[in-house]
Image (cartoon, rainbow, N blue to C red):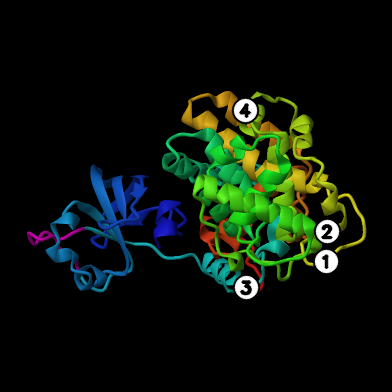
Amino acid sequence: MQYIWKYRLYTDTELFTTEGFPVSVIDPGIQNTDAGPDFFNAKIRIAGDVWAGNVEIHLKASDWRLHGHDRNPAYDSVILHVVAECDEPAHRTNGEMIPHAVIRVPPVMQQQMAWLLSRDTPLPCAERIGEIDPLHVSAWINALLTERLERKMQDVFALLEQYANDWHEVFYVTLARTFGFGVNSDAFEWLARSLPFKYILKQRGNGLQIEALLFGQAGLLEEAHPDPYYRSLQREYVFLRKKYGLQPRESHLVRCMRTRPVNFPHLRLAQLAAVWTNNDMLFSKALECDDCHALRDDFNVSLPEYWDTHYHFQSASPARKKKIGVHAAYIIMINTVVPVLFAYGRKNRMPAYGARALQILEKIPPERNSVVSTFAKAGIEAHNAFDTQALIQLRREYCEKKKCLYCRIGFRLLKSSTPGEP
């Protein structure tokens, strides 16, 4: 009922109060998600007189009394009580009766809503997205990308507050989380939080010591092991741990199960160490670099020879160079460089950085994942990372949460005169 009122989707072209006075909605008001009337600052013409105030919406008029509104002064400002069924009058605390208007959900809309919300599929409207004008879909994609960047920006701002506006520290923690590639994202973030960036900088250029710090803080150097490389890392960490007063994390927080060898945490930590060994001021580079491909190449670093034949410390593997691949480098840019640049531009009121973040997404090829392929099958093709990030936002924040009523595609389908399959 609130949705129908907000978007004026009721059947009658003209509303009337239960006393027969004509009602014209000039402005339905601003929807309230907190305590109090459902819509604030509405403007309504009743029998020729313009009223400004609040609107309350119920299925039955008797809900006014059942909810205690007749005893709550916060509801005395209500100028119209909108209901689906008027079964009794509603009154303010002083006894004055409040005008009622009855609106009914159009039958086609009821069928559309039932069809959308009852479908147990990753994309409930997949069969009907083709009905939507591509211009509407494109506009929604742009809005979704902004939503996603705004959400990630708030994560960056939270880190910025914790680290006293130190953008290098924020970039360091965000990059560590990204290197967890989902399954170890939390563990790698905790690791970075336990190992201040200044200690990485103090070992700048010394790849073995940076590796030792990362592996040691991850709790992965606590066992006796015959591997010479492992023992050298262990010796370095014992020294550095005492020097900086570090406390390692529990090793069980790092997960190896159900991950492909290229995503083993040991290999990802070695790659992260190599990135910081070769680019100790990476955030400054990200701010200054206009070349998307040059920035990508900053992550294409070489690892020590040991990792040519290892994915972890337990056993050797066939020899293979294990540089960060192009696809992984793009993911790092999407999840670290872009949100931090976007947040930096907003925080410092320098929109050029936000624009550059969007340009980076436009230049990166579309991501390859199940979300993108699902939308492709439904007819929505992604042309770059700008599109794929928007589609991920759509899937996670609308489709998975069954928020079809708040999706612009769902809105267009609800207004359609052609109902879905029952």
Residue 90 is inside the magenta segment = yes
Predominant SS of the magenta segment:
loop
Closer to us: mark 1 or mark 4?
1
What segment carries the magenta color?
89-98
The residue at which mark 2 appears reads as 310
Q: Are marks 1 and 2 in contact (CB under 8 Å)?
A: yes
On screen, residue 138 versus residue 15, left or right, reads right
Under mark 2, the amino acid is His
Decide: is 120 above or below 148.
below
Compare marks 2 and 4 and give the one earlier in the sequence.
4
Alpha carbons under labels 1 and 4: distance apart: 38 Å
Compare marks 3 and 4 and give the one earlier in the sequence.
3
Check disc 1: other Cα within 10 Å, few if <14, some if 14-19, many if 20+: few
On screen, residue 420 versus residue 351, left or right, reads right
Q: Which mark is residue 315?
A: 1
Instruction: Check the picture and name the quadrant holding the N terminus.
Output: bottom left
The residue at which mark 3 appears reads as 119
Q: Position of residue 115 (x, y in %)?
A: 60, 71
Q: Position of residue 217 (x, y in %)?
A: 59, 55
Alpha carbons under labels 1 and 2: distance apart: 7 Å
